[in-house]
Amino acid sequence: MKALYPEITPYHTFFLETGSKHSVYVEQSGNPDGFPAIFLHGGPCSGTKPDHRRFFDPEYYRIILFDQRGCGQSLPFGELEHNTTQDLIDDMERIRQELRINQWLVFGGSWGAALALLYAQQHTNRVSSLIIRAVFLARQQDMDWFIKNGVRLIYPEQWQRLMTSMPESGRQNPIQGLWNALWGNDEVTVRRVAREWMAWGAQVALGNVYQGYSHDSHVTDNMVQQVRMELHYAKNHYFIEENQILNLCHKLTAIPATIIHGRNDLVCPMEAGMMLSKALPHADYVVLPNAGHIGQGDSMISALVTATDQWILNN
């Protein structure tokens, strides 16, 4: 069983200018002369964390993390203008060119997994290898599972709190209803919807580990902006065509890939991992029987570190 590598700090940080109001936070750690690997965080509007550096052997890898537009340390936080999937893909290319990288390993989980696949489909010759965790394919059925007719049957109490946080008129179409509430003029409703959306996401992602929250807990402006960004992407179908990721997987057959999925993942159900493995039959497909959605827990961490270590052995 493998564990995370020791904690490290970046040796280089900068803000990437994008030709828009967005400045994207980028950092490098590990070996400056090592093989480049870029980590793509989930969300949207999640952001990178120090432990994300620790999936990679710092003696071998040049580890690149960045906060996607409007996320984490990128500025301005929560900004939605010029914030689409294609903008994020273009930022990745800007980072690659700025750092004078020819090819890199691309590692992403959940929304970051979708972004990794979409980037690789556009810039195939720039990707040496893919490590995909918690497959998210950004299909309508994936959103329906999360917000309409799927996981609500497993957590009906939490689902009911989310539904009753917004006006009754919006509950038939939850994404639109939540959107309308979040951009409405009733500040109490805005804060209540933001809190319940974050609570719903935490419950589904964490399962039995979720500790709940206080109903009178303070909802910050950043929390509201984070939820608005998540709904911005969801309402716009993640700015891609229906089933686009699977339809374009034929472009990835020359790229070594590892797919890692927890069977207990209720955010991105197991079916998504299976469908991606069928579209990429050359990929190593690892199913973790006791793991869930998040990139934590002994079996998930071991599988992810094994995947990055295996790439070293193969090259």
Image (cartoon, rainbow, N blue to C red):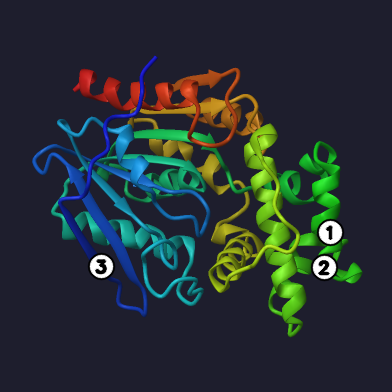
278 or 105, nearer to the observer: 105
CB contact under 8 Å: marks 1 and 3: no
Give whichever of discs 1 and 3 has the lower sequence position.
Answer: 3
| Circle on res. 108 | none
Q: Which residue is mark 3?
A: 15
Please indicate whether residue 155 sits to the left or right of residue 55 in the image.
right
Q: Secondary structure at mark 2?
A: loop
147 or 245, nearer to the observer: 147
Q: Which residue is mark 2?
A: 166
Residue 268 seen in this snapshot: no
Q: Secondary structure at mark 1?
A: helix
Above/below status of 11 relative to 293: below
Q: Position of residue 260 (x, y in %)?
A: 48, 27
Q: Secondary structure at mark 3?
A: strand
Residue lying at 57% horizontally and 30% vertically, measured from the top left: 273
Q: Position of residue 58 (x, y in %)?
A: 19, 34
- Mark 3–mark 2 Cα distance, whole angstroms, equals 37 Å
Give, as a three-letter code, the residue at label 3: Phe
Quadrant of the image for the N terminus?
top left
| Numbered marks: total | 3
- Mark 1–mark 2 Cα distance, whole angstroms, equals 6 Å
Give, as a three-letter code, the residue at label 2: Met
Above/below status of 16 relative to 280: below
Please indicate whether residue 212 sits to the left or right of residue 158 in the image.
left
Please indicate whether residue 66 sits to the left or right of residue 12 in the image.
right
CB contact under 8 Å: marks 3 and 2: no
- Mark 1–mark 3 Cα distance, whole angstroms, equals 39 Å
Packing grade of label 2 (10 A; few <14, some 14-19, many >=20) is many
Give, as a three-letter code, the residue at label 1: Met
Q: Which residue is mark 1?
A: 163
CB contact under 8 Å: marks 1 and 2: yes
Residue 298 seen in this snapshot: yes
